[in-house]
Amino acid sequence: MAAAVAVSLPKSSPAASRELNHSFLSGSPLKGLLFQVKPRISKDRNQSSLVVSAGEAKGGGRFYFNFTGFPFPLGPFLNRRTLRYEAVKGAIWLFEQEQALGFSSVSTNIRMTVIKLKSGGLWVHAPIAPTKECIQLVKELGAPVEYIILPTFAYEHKIFVGPFSREFPRAQVWVAPRQWSWPVNLPLEFFGIFRSKILEDEDSSTPWGDEIEQKVLSSPEVGIGPYVEVAFYHKRTRTLLVTDAVIYVPRQPPECISKESLLSSAKNGLAVKLLSKGKEVSGEPVVDNNTYRQKGWERMVLQILFLGPSNLLEPKASFSQMSQKLIVSPIVKTLVFSKVPEKVRDWIDRIARDWRFKRIIPAHFAAPINASSSDFLAAFGFLDDLLGERYVTRPSLSLLFTSLLGKAASYFPPDDMRTLSSLDQFLVSVGAVKKTVSGRKK
C-alpha cells in the first residue's frame, strides 16, 4: 500500500490556469504504508508541483453505488477514485473525482474544496461522493469537519451532501436558499439532508463570517426553477469559490478521469458519425497513447460545453478556442444567465467590488485559477450586449480593457453554438424555459 499528498507550487501569471498533476490517492489505513516522494513538473509552464504518490494496489475504498440522476444517471456507478492536493499551503485542499454523464463516454471532474478555519476545524464546500478513500483523505488532514456547505440547487452536488454529512454527524449543514428538484420537487430530507441551515446573502453572522464572506445569486425562475448559487470569499488567502458560474478548461484532462473513459471518447462511435460535418468516419482501432487520450478529452469538453458541437471528428480547432481562458459555460450562459442579466450583473459587480481575490476555485475543470476581478468580469462580457449602457456609469481605460477581454472570453464558435441555440429556442417555444430580457418577459 501507499499514501499520497499533492502540494502545488504556484508561479505568478495573471489569469493562468494551474493545470494539475498529481498521482492517484489511496484511502487505506496508515498502518504499513510506504511513502514515496517524487518531484514532478507540469507540462503547463504556469505550474509546478511536488507530488507524494499514493495508491492502494486493488483500488479498495473506492466503491460507491449510484444509479440516480435525471434525465441521465451520474456515473461512475460503482467505483470513484479520489485525488487530493494542497491548493494553499496549510489552508485550502481540493478533492476531485470523475463524474460521468449516464452511460455515455462523456466525463469531467467534480471538486470539493476544504478550508481550515482559525478554530482548527474544516469548512467543506460542495461535498463529493464519500467513499472510504475520500473520507480517509479528509481525516488525514487531522482536523474535525465543522461545516458542510451546499452552495447550489444543482442535483450533481446536492446528492452527496446527505451521505457525506453522515460521516461527520457533528458538523453543521448549510445550504443555498430556494432548493428544488425536477421532475418531482422533493424536500431536502429525501436526499438525506436534515436540520440544515440556510445561507443568506451577505450574512456576516455565520460561524465563519469573520473569515469567509458570501454572496447569493438567486434569480427569478428561468424555466422549471430558479438558478441559485452562493459565492464565497476566503479573506486570508484571497480566494473566490464558485460552483458553476465560471470555468477554465485545461489543455490536458484532469487526472481523476480514467484512461478508459478518455479512450472510449476517442472511439469513432455514433455521436462522432452524427457530428462529423459529413466527412467519412474511419473505423480505425484506438490504442492507448497520449494522442488518443487527448482526442478523447477534447471531444468530452465540446460535448459538455455545447451538447452537440459541430465537428466531433476533428475537435482540436474548437477545443483550442474554448480552452485556456476563463469563461462562462455556453450552456449556463445560454439557458440561464442570458435570461436574467440584471440579476447576474448585480451579483458579479458586488463580487468584483467587495472582494480582492487573486485566485478562483470552481467546482469543475481546472483549479485554482490565477485570476483577478477584471478577469472575472471579462468572462461575463456578454452581459454588456444584453444590458446595453445601463450599467456603465462612466468610461475608463479599465472598463474598456475589461470590455475587450470580455469580447474574447464570450466568443464561442457559431457552428458549435447552433445545437444549443436551437435547443434554447425549442425550450422557449414549449414553455420549459422563459425568454427574458433584463429579468422581464419579452
Image: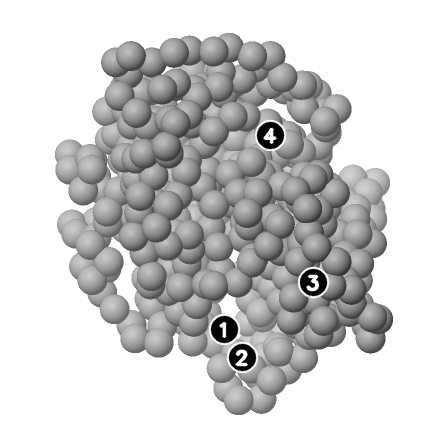
**Residue assigned mark 1:** 222
Q: Nearer the viewer, mark 3 or mark 4?
A: 3
Work out whether residue 174 or residue 298 is closer to the camera in this orientation and state it.
Answer: 298
Which element type, helix, strand or loop, lies under badge 1?
Answer: loop
Which element type, helix, strand or loop, lies under badge 4?
Answer: loop
User: Which mark is drawn over residue 396?
Assistant: none
**Residue assigned mark 4:** 20
The residues tagged by marks 1 and 4 sit, at their Cα atoms, a distance apart of: 35 Å
Tell me the quarter of the picture where residue 130 sits. top left
**Callout 1–callout 4 Cβ contact below 8 Å:** no
Name the N-terminal-most of marks 1 and 2: 1
Question: Which residue shows up at 72% across the image and 71% down it?
Answer: 273
**Residue assigned mark 3:** 268
Work out whether residue 333 or residue 79 is closer to the camera in this orientation and state it.
Answer: 79
**Callout 1–callout 2 Cβ contact below 8 Å:** yes
The residues tagged by marks 3 and 4 sit, at their Cα atoms, a distance apart of: 28 Å
**Callout 4–callout 2 Cβ contact below 8 Å:** no
Q: Nearer the viewer, mark 1 or mark 4?
A: 4
Q: Amino acid at mark 3?
A: Asn
Q: Nearer the viewer, mark 4 or mark 2?
A: 4
